[in-house]
Image (cartoon, rainbow, N blue to C red):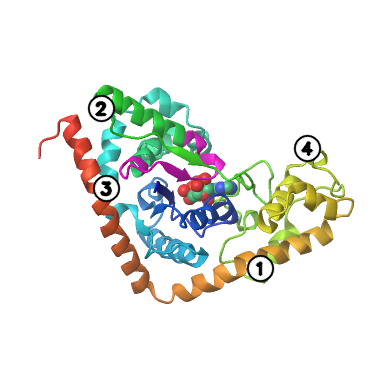
Amino acid sequence: MQRVFSGIQPTGVPQLGNYLGAIRNWVALQKDHECIFCLVDMHALTVWRTPETLRQDTFTQTACLIASGINPKSQILYNQSAVSAHARLGWIFNCVVRLGWLNRMTQFKEKAGKDREAHSAGLYIYPSLMAADIHAFHATRVPVGDDQRQHLEIANDIAEKFNHDYEVDFFPTIEALIPPEAARVMSLRDGTKKMSKSDPSAQSRIELTDTADEIALKIRRAKTDAEPLPSEEEGLESRPEARNLVTIYAALSGESMAQVLARFGGSGFGPFKTALADLLVTHIGPVGDETRRLLQAPDHLQAVLRDGAERANVIAEPIVREAERLVGFLR
Ligand code: AQP
């Protein structure tokens, strides 16, 4: 059975892009894979947040994942900082990765913006910690959204260089599992920007805990253009906001873009937006309700994470110890 690893940052409430690009895929993979799902709190620390926010977001994300269908008994669900293997292998990989490789990472450029010097070194070396997250488990399959494609490429480059430098065949090649549809859900306020938990505008995203009224309002206010919906996909070219909404509808309904446009093409956005909001409420509503219920018992959530961390440690510890031995660390 192939081993899957994937992570999500506790940097707010999971949004629709996290759900369609990653979480929904994670739930499906549980059927025939050994899965390790991680709340990557060390990555979350790369951008300033208060201790209380980080703690609360870790609880919320844990609850959201379980409410979405992640089974913490049959799979492993834990928070990254509780397993020291991440930090130890991350350091080794910091010494393998080349500055030139890190300089090419588009996510750092996007997150740091113009004021690069003011950002943490952690944000810059994020990709080598992410590589360590995966390789500490010898995981071979990593379900992610399209925005993580470049980080998985560098994770393979780091493993290849490690194997080459130490003349071993220790870290395997990893395969990115990127969903065919909705791999990059865009902001509801700007169809050229990806939907993000930490976007300052809450109107730009659907959160998994949004109520039916909040979902309906956000979709009603979602940016569109003045033209009616086209009847064919080519008509969505250079209409990023319209394309995004149709993509979301198709991903949730299981229909193709062509089928969605055959039904709604030719009319204005009004009836389409109502149908989209209803579809979202059907899919997201129960997740929000279950999340709120689970959040009533934080002690239980913490016990779930602790149990997951113990089981994660059993897998990662011997792998990282061997990596430490290979580089020449004494014990
Ligand atoms: N808009 C998106 N469309 C499709 N997939 C997405 N993912 C994130 N946004 C979209 C996927 O969700 C998984 C977890 O992401 P993450 O929390 O580790 O980091 P991120 O990609 O930086 O997500 P956010 O929501 O934008 O977080 P912040 O605002 O904190 O930076 C990943 O598999 C990602 O591809």
Which of the two marks, 4 or 2, is nearer to us in this view?
2
| Comes first in the chain, label 1 or label 4 | 4
**How far is disc 3 from disc 4 in space, using C-alphas?**
46 Å
Q: Which corner quadrant of the image does residue 183 belong to? A: top right
Image quadrant for the C terminus? top left
Task: Give residue 10's position: percent from left, percent from top.
Answer: 43, 56
Farthest left residue in view: 331
At label 1, counting other C-alpha atoms closer than 10 Å, the crowd grade (few under 14, some 14-19, many 20 or more) is: few
**How far is disc 4 from disc 2 in space, using C-alphas?**
48 Å
Which mark, by number, is residue 316? 3
In the image, residue 104 lies in the stretch drawn in magenta: no
| Comes first in the chain, label 2 or label 3 | 2
Q: Which residue is mark 1?
A: 282
The residues colored magenta run 134-151
| Comes first in the chain, label 3 or label 4 | 4
User: Disc 3 beta carbon < 8 A from ligand 1?
Assistant: no
Q: Which residue is mark 4?
A: 237
Task: Give residue 28's position: percent from left, percent from top.
Answer: 52, 56
Which of the two marks, 2 or 1, is nearer to us in this view?
2
Does the residue at mark 3 contact the one at mark 1 (Cβ under 8 Å)?
no
Q: Which corner quadrant of the image does residue 321 belong to? A: top left
**How far is disc 2 from disc 3 in space, using C-alphas?**
18 Å
At label 2, counting other C-alpha atoms closer than 10 Å, the crowd grade (few under 14, some 14-19, many 20 or more) is: few
Q: Which residue is mark 2?
A: 168
Q: Secondary structure at mark 3?
A: helix
| Comes first in the chain, label 3 or label 1 | 1
User: Disc 1 beta carbon < 8 A from ligand 1?
Assistant: no
Residue, x 89% and y 54% (percent of image)? 267
**Is residue 45 shown left or right of residue 27?**
left
